[in-house]
Image (spheres, rainbow, N blue to C red):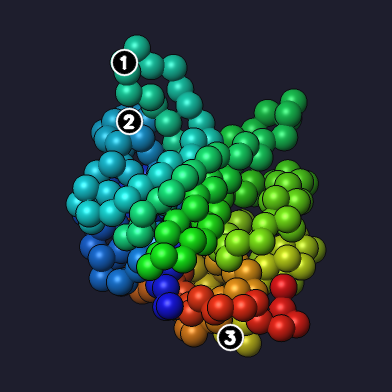
């Protein structure tokens, strides 16, 4: 079974040209042919900057997909609709269950971080998706990555971990992640797949890590409409094998 997976930091729909345009984000997702999309920097009725739109609901309805959300920041609201910011998931496949795991380090005051966990069912085969966005602070990032690794070490179901990790290939945190899951870019290419900044990508900040149940077929950063966000979306095509690949983590 082949799966097309996308991770995309959408910068709350505001592009490098300063325009707020969720339609561009939807167009990129649709053109990518992705079955499952992990989203970072997603607003849900959050602030004036995104016109208080529930961006996940808008995208899910526009693309006719299932959706799940994991908040990293929640603001007080006088209305029933929560004002939230965080990570999201869009899927052509049914979402069986989902939960959100806080990664913030208390009592250190910093932007909230979390990991969204979801179990999906594709053609009768269950698998898990984890979507996260790590801190730019090296110390906090290392702590957050360790918490993710502890969660993944005991995970027996096929799984993918994706998002804006704010790290470079070859660093200590990257190496720790590769102890339990594979960076699909590193597995498919001899060099990083640059995703940031979108117009002239110089760094890889966005990643998809896969468990050994998956065969990696192709990986690319999509250059369609680079003005839509400050990050390029990263796409991988995978084949879900019946048995884990020998000798890989």
Residue farthest to the bottom, as pictured: 190
Query: What is the distance, in whole Å, between disc 1 and disc 3 at their CAs?
Result: 48 Å
- Quarter containing the N terminus: bottom left
Residue 18 location in percent, x, y? 31, 49
**Position of 159 relative to 19 (above/below):** below
Q: Residue at x 73, y 47 (%)?
A: 147
Determine which residue is flagged by label 2.
45
Residue at 36 percent of width and 35 percent of height? 44
In this rendering, the answer to whether 172 lies above or below 243 is above
Q: Compute the Cα span from label 3 to label 2.
A: 39 Å
User: Quadrant of the rendered structure where residue 209 is?
Assistant: bottom right
Neighbour tally class for label 2: few under 14, some 14-19, many 20 plus, Cα within 10 Å: many
First-in-chain label (1 vs 2): 2
In the rendered image, the vertical position of residue 41 relative to residue 44, given as above or below: below
Instruction: Find out whether the residues at labels 3 and 2 contact each other: C-beta distance under 8 Å.
Output: no
Q: Quadrant of residue 237?
A: bottom left
Q: Do tag 1 and tag 2 residues touch (Cβ < 8 Å)?
A: yes
Q: Secondary structure at mark 2?
A: loop
Q: Residue at 42% of width from left, 78% of height from top?
A: 2
Frontmost residue, 191 versus 115: 115
Callout 3 secondary element: loop
Residue designated by label 1: 79
Residue 175, image x, y percentages:
76, 68
Query: Considering only vertical position in the picture, is 108 above or below 198?
Result: above
Label annotation for residue 239? none
- Residue hosting label 3: 189
Q: Are marks 1 and 3 in contact (CB under 8 Å)?
A: no
Q: Which quarter of the rendering shows the C terminus?
A: bottom right
Give me the C-alpha separation between circle 1 and circle 2. Answer: 10 Å
């Amino acid at each position: 079974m082949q799966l097309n997976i996308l991770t995309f930091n959408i910068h709350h729909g505001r592009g490098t040209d300063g325009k707020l345009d969720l339609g561009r984000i939807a167009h990129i997702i649709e053109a990518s042919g992705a079955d499952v999309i992990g989203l970072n920097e997603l607003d849900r009725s959050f602030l004036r900057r995104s016109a208080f739109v529930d961006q996940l609901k808008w995208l899910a309805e526009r693309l006719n997909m299932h959706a799940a959300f994991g908040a990293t920041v929640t603001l007080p609201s006088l209305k029933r609709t929560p004002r939230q910011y965080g990570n999201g998931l869009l899927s052509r496949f049914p979402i069986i269950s989902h939960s959100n795991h806080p990664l913030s380090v208390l009592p250190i005051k910093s932007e909230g971080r979390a990991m969204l966990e979801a179990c999906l069912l594709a053609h009768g085969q269950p698998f898990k998706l984890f979507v996260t966005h790590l801190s730019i602070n090296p110390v906090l990032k290392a702590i957050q990555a360790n918490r993710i690794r502890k969660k993944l070490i005991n995970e027996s179901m096929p799984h993918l971990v994706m998002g804006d990790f704010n790290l470079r290939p070859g660093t200590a945190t990257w190496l720790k992640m590769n102890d339990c899951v594979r960076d699909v870019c590193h597995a498919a290419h001899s060099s990083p797949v640059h995703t940031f900044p979108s117009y002239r990508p110089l760094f890889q900040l966005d990643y998809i890590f896969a468990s050994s149940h998956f065969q990696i077929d192709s990986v690319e950063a999509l250059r369609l409409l680079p003005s839509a966000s400050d990050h390029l979306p990263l796409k991988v095509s995978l084949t879900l094998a019946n048995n884990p690949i020998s000798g890989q983590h």
